[in-house]
Amino acid sequence: MKLSILVILIMLISAKVYSRTYAASISYKQTQSLTYEINLLVYQDTFNIWTFVNLDINGSYMAVNQKSVNIIGDVAIVSYTGSHTFASSGNYTILADLGNREGGIWNIPNSINVLMGIEAEITVGSFTPNNSAYDSICLVDTVLIDSLFMVDLSMYDSDNDSLSYKLLPCRCDDGYFINGYSFPDQYPNFQLDSISGILLWDSPSIEFARYSILLSVEEWRAGIMISRTEHERYIIIKGHSGISNMANNKSLGIDIFPNPASESLQINTKLDIRNTNYQIFNVIGKSIKKGKIKDNDERIYLKDFKPGVYILSIMIDSKMFSQKFIVQ
């Protein structure tokens, strides 16, 4: 995306440069043969909440307009959406150039002066239906210092396509990878399983450090990659007790089902977890329900839960293990 001086001036006038961007994700839905709904989710500060974001689609520009705003403290979680009809079948790249990042991100040099870029790739016309994998889970992870951190980044695909996961260097403007970017410290103890989507960090050691990572989700059908979407996440290291947004249960043999759920959620494990505490949080970390597990095959009823993504957390041996689930 080579912006002319005029376009750069327009961007400056729109005051994006004054707003800080923390995290973002991009997804799409096929609505007709060549027509797609493109969705962007952006975590930004509340200084200047944009009414639209321009996307570059193979050199052509379109705007996705603000759909909803959820303000939490000084952070606005803003969704943008727009419809685009492609001229013909083929492979397309969608790029969003977003606002400046905040200062002090440990793995991005001079981060306060670095814009955020995020991409998606779509194969149009050859596969129908073709909807990207999607998960509305919170894009901010709170990690405890000197503790093993595991997060389940796997997503749901409505077309039952196969998914694989990669970590990429974060992008700046024009979609370029950031010069000098590094993965969080103690790599390779910071690693992502490409099949399960489990991210493991053993163990963060710098209190109050902040990191940015870029998750690339590839969608495969009949051995062909038909799409790729990106999700930039923001990680905060905490020095006091709390929950990690998505600590993984699988190492404990804990299973929850059905997922997606509607009326109730069942917990199944071979461990004796009777009389342990559980909590359910929404995607912004607010506690929705809490209680004690009375049996190893505990059933939690979801009356009055609105459709969306939630996090079930169970306290075992002074550690909090969590897993996401969807309410339909």
Image (cartoon, rainbow, N blue to C red):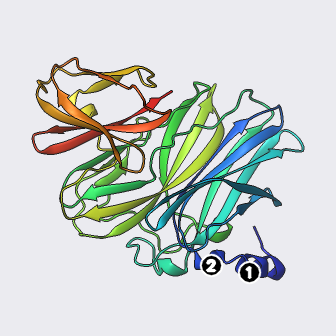
Indicate the quadrant where residue 24 lies.
bottom right
Element class at badge 1: helix
Furthest residue toward right: 87
Element class at badge 2: helix
Q: Are marks 1 and 2 in contact (CB under 8 Å)?
A: no
Indicate the position of residue 265 as horizontal and vertical percent values. Answer: 35, 23
Amino acid type, callout 2: Val
Instruction: Give the CA separation, mark 1 to mark 2.
Output: 9 Å
Q: Which mark is residue 81?
A: none
Name the residue carrying label 2. 17
Amino acid type, callout 1: Ile
Q: Viewer-proximal residue, 74 or 104?
A: 74
Indicate the position of residue 167 as horizontal and vertical percent values. Answer: 47, 52
Name the residue carrying label 1. 13
Q: Is residue 269 left or right of residue 72?
A: left
Q: Is residue 58 left or right of residue 66?
A: right
Q: Residue at x 32, y 56 (%)?
A: 142
Indicate the position of residue 212 as horizontal and vertical percent values. Answer: 44, 63
Indicate the quadrant where residue 252 lies.
top left
Determine crowd level at label 2: few under 14, some 14-19, many 20+ residues with C-alpha closer than 10 A. Answer: some
Indicate the quadrant where residue 298 lies.
top left
Up-down relation of residue 311 to residue 126 (above or below)? below
Q: Residue at x 66, y 48 (%)?
A: 39
